[in-house]
Amino acid sequence: MTDLREARELRELRAELRAAVRGEVDFGTTARALTTMDASNYRRVPLGVVAPRDADDVAAALSVCRTYGVPVVPRGGGTSIAGQATGTGVVLDFTRHMNRLLSLDPRARTAVVQPGLVLDRLQEAAAPHGLRFGPDPSTHGRCTLGGMIGNNSCGSHSVAWGTTADSVRHLTVLTPRGERLPLGRGWAGAPAGLRELAEGELARLRTGFPDLPRRISGYALDALLPERGTDVARSFCGSEGTLGVLTEAVVDLVRAPRARALAVLAYADETGAAEAAAGLLEHGPLTVEGMAADLVPAAADLPRGGAWLFVETGGDTEGEARARAETIVRAADVLDALVVTDPARQRTLWRIREDASGTATRMPDGTEAWPGWEDCAVPPARLGAYLRDFRGLLAEHGLRGAPYGHFGDGCIHVRIDFDLLTGPGVARFRRFSEELAGLVVAHGGSLSGEHGDGQARAELLPRMYGPDMVALFERVKGVWDPDDLLNPGMLVRPAPLDANLRFAVLPSKPVDVTFGYPSDGGDFSAAVRRCVGVAKCRTASAPGPAVMCPSFRATGEEEHSTRGRARLLHEMLAGELVTDGWRSTEVRDALGLCLSCKGCRSDCPVGVDMATYKAEFLHHHYAGRRRPAAHYAMGRLPVWLGWVARTRSAGVLNALASVGPLARVAKRLGGIAGEREIPRVAGETFTRWWRGRSPVVPSGAGTGEGDGEGGGAGAGDLVVLWPDTFTEHLSPSVGQAAVRVLEAAGLRVALPPTLRPGGRPVGDGRSRSAARLLTARRGRVCCGLTYISTGQLDHARAVLRRTLDLMEPVLATDAPVVVLEPSCAAALRTDAPELLHDDPRAARLAARVRTFAEALEQYAPDWTPPALDRPVTGQTHCHQHAVLGDTADRGMRDAAGLTGELSGGCCGLAGNFGFEKGHYEVSAACAEEQLLPAVRQAPEDAVVLADGFSCRTQLEQLAGVRGRHLAEVLAQGLGSGPAAS
């Protein structure tokens, strides 16, 4: 009866909310799953999500929830690290509608903002006026102003511009009982009873708070002291959504320096850097950030040392900023130093620091590390001593962590390799937390120096403030929220720090999967756990080379972000909310708009690989069931195109595809978007051209097409050119051009074998018995990409095994395998060994794969490409960015005089994605994000570079522009020939 009554009340709650609120009210599985977690260790399943359109909607939602006694949790970007953005009641999502910049006054240096406004949008609006919002957390691309006010966020520039509370002028707040309060100074907007309560505790307010720049823990009641202006708005900052719901804020802006310099100071270790930090503050730096070598990529261009301080200075001119930075270098006792004034290089260095929140989630040996004690703060002068004691405490508990953060403010971020999966591990997490709280207090510090207390630290606040102050916090909560409606369990009467851990619901045994997940010990749960909610995938724009996450930038929906999809997979594994496992339609629909661009594999700080997870899911989801038509039409494209080639019916097919009614029928049957044109199939395949160009000659090496030797008479190194499906059937001119360039560079070109010995594979690539040759079968190499992207993993494995059989003679040599199509190269380099983790030949082949530019760079280092001397535009292929890298391509373009940068992002076609029915609008939106604007803005004589067939097709179909592979461009520069027209 209780369950029935609860179900009835839930339906009534949902109905009343929908009747009262003009914004969206969603109690569905997907909406709830997306908000079970923030960026912390905690998980709570809400009843539903409300996206209010305005303050009236907020008031209506609060009224309904108060009637039913249902808790309310205000939520912004969901990047909180202490658990305060999760709850079991109704979540108010401010990012959907209440996300606007209402006004900006350059003269007064103020802005009026709604709580869901992302910080970067405010910075972009303020920048033309030479202004900015002072605080800037590393999550600035996705955190919201409401969340920053709720947590009293800080960021790297807090030594210059303070915390969010220092930048707040007025706040408009709704109390849980619907009262609208305009908070400000001089008791403005104070709820009834707050003034009397504070004035009765003045002595405690004057003596009970530690004096340090990063004291975020607890309620900021000392802001109510008369000597501090009795600032109610300031005291509200950092209350973590427990006192009232913010609907509007007036914030102060600061004058941004016209020029900046970045001094990178190197020290022997983090203690040396920490001890030096406080002494630099007298020089007025904008930042004093620290990090140690265990968080820095090996390739990072930093001065020699074991730890670094990133010290930024400003000025009206570059010379002034540099002079201030050099003054700091002279004043600092350093091993080495570097001063950078180039903005692009500064951004590159700052990305190292900003990505630390994700990088720190993995120890150097791959062990998982977690927040929990993410941001304690001590007086800056005590930081070195605190770090030594902190390291000692870690050692006592057998734990490891990599501290980094705001050394100038004495605030340290750290992820620790807690075992949060087992009972003994969780018990150790609790013991360590209790002892560390004591250590922080002993150094005069705050349990939280930036991210708030949430559930992670609120239980331990009595150790910092004592029971009387914590009791005062409870009384303050009672004044603001007498019904305990807002975010219960946070700050006062907190839930235990080791309850509601998000890992507890995951399977205790590894899930049976097809990919190998080598970086996660073969455990799919561990792969999904990689997403800790950093939410870099939720950035609305990604200037520069970044790719992740194109579908989120196109739709703005959480479920179409990498984090959103990872959350749904987490809930699928948990089985509590998403109950139908691999058959889940919620997970399927969220993954449906994943382009499999692999951008997250490189751009996500924790290396989430959603393209692989999607392929894995589709494999299980459709096991034994009929698939969408597009999976058959495009997932098995190599089969259909091979049939066309064998029957020499390309002309007939192209003619039929040009007939409108027939094309429409074909697209409908094949699950292809009606807006798309069917690409033309080449009348002559690349390998047929190859055979006509170079006669087949029997060879013992077996590395030529048809078991013949390669073309070209040169004595240079042998390279095996991979005839991928797209080059073979759809754009053979790319292959022809590549042959011309490779041979011009002095290399001998061969194609992979097409004879596969019968019976068992040749183990060493040397067997030539007559019996085996008599039973040999013809075949074509294939990377399996189309099967992988559509989750047909059994087919992909079979295709790849046949390919490895064919490639054994090649693997017996030292010849590299040159792959022209970036997506195919990426599939061979990463997907193949992870899918065939039981076949060592896959890893051997992966190690041989080279891109076109890599082959020229490594095997023809003395060759000079033709001088083209033209600007370029276009886009770096997303798979090349994520998996292959483009260093060799950049070098080749420079050598050929091809000037300019290629855009980042994804073209939006992404293999089968952009062709599938229902994907056209998102596909086009992805192209409009960076690629198409870059091409439109390019000089008239610019070469449009697009190495991927999908990128070239998208350019042709959406912009009427012909993109060309780098091989085609270089071949044209060589003069007359098949690719010179």
Image (tube, rainbow, N blue to C red):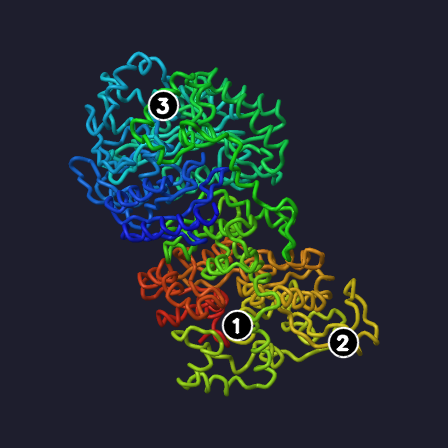
- Marks 1 and 2 sit apart, C-alpha to C-alpha, by 29 Å
- For residue 776, the mark is 2
Crowding at mark 1 (Cα within 10 Å: few <14, some 14-19, many 20+): many
Residue at image coords 52%, 44%? 606
Query: 302 left or right of 686?
Result: left
Residue 292 location in percent, x, y?
52, 31
Q: How many marks?
A: 3
Observer-nearest residue: 25 or 716? 25
Q: Nearer the viewer, mark 3 or mark 2?
A: 3
Q: Are marks 3 and 2 in contact (CB under 8 Å)?
A: no
The residue pinned by badge 3 equals: 473
**Residue flagged by tag 3: what amino acid is it?**
Phe
- Marks 3 and 2 sit apart, C-alpha to C-alpha, by 81 Å
Inspect this view and state whether residue 296 appears: no
Mark 1 or mark 2, earlier in chain: 1
Query: 704 left or right of 278?
Result: right
Residue at image coords 62%, 38%? 365
Q: Nearer the viewer, mark 3 or mark 1?
A: 3
The residue pinned by badge 1 equals: 634
Residue at image coords 37%, 66%? 921
Residue 59 location in percent, x, y?
26, 42
Task: Give the vertical position of 60 relative to 428 (above or below).
Answer: below
Q: Secondary structure at mark 3?
A: helix
Observer-nearest residue: 896 or 948? 948
Task: Give the vertical position of 540 relative to 667 (above or below).
Answer: above
